[in-house]
Image: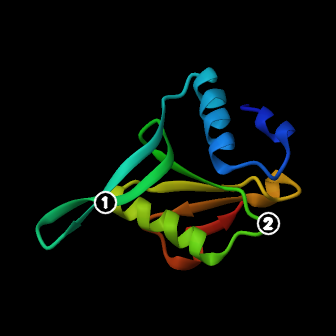
Amino acid sequence: MLRFRCIALGPGLLETVYEVILAHELRKAGLSVERQRPIAIRYDGLTFDEGFRADLVVEDLVIVELKSVQTLAPVHSKQLLTQLRLTELKLGLLINFGEERLKNGIKRVANGLPRSDAEIRL
């Protein structure tokens, strides 16, 4: 089981700090991780590179969107779901390091499931 030692840093740091440390821990666990992967937008037969950036893409299967806010807002899940749709990936994790207890700040977001099933709190 992967242990998130970055929890020891506690809440209140910038998202980029958690991003670099989480990417490091995932790589140490033997997983491939890409940071800040560009996500293009395709519209009207054109591709625009000014789209989104995924914080982390793990094993080319899962997008991990990191936040460092007091409370997650619905827009955070919608942002991750949009990234999943644009990349045609099926699973994302929204992790908020601003929560007092990290386990309360982890949300699973799935692409292609009915809305009620798409957001399941871990």
- Residue in the picture at 13% in, 73% down: 44
Q: Report the quarter where the C terminus lies.
A: bottom right
Q: Position of residue 121 (x, y in %)?
A: 71, 64
Judged from the image, the secondary structure of the residue bearing numbered disc 1 is: strand
Q: Which mark is residue 36?
A: none
Q: Nearer the viewer, residue 32 or 96?
A: 96
63 over 43 or under it: above or below:
above
Q: Nearer the viewer, residue 88 or 57?
A: 57
27 over 37 or under it: above or below:
above
Judged from the image, the secondary structure of the residue bearing numbered disc 2 is: loop
Judging by the rendered image, the residue that carries numbered circle 1 is 50
Q: Report the quarter where the N terminus lies.
A: top right
Count of labels in the image: 2
Q: Position of residue 41 (x, y in %)?
A: 28, 63
Colour pattern of the rendering: rainbow
Q: Nearer the viewer, residue 61 or 102?
A: 102
Category of crowding for the residue at label 2, using alpha-carbon neighbours closer than 10 angstroms: few (below 14), some (14–19), many (at least 20): some
Judging by the rendered image, the residue that carries numbered circle 2 is 70
Measured in 3D between alpha carbons, the distance from the residue under mark 2 to the one under mark 1, in whole angstroms, is: 28 Å
Residue 38 falls left or right of residue 97: left
- Residue in the picture at 58% in, 25% down: 27
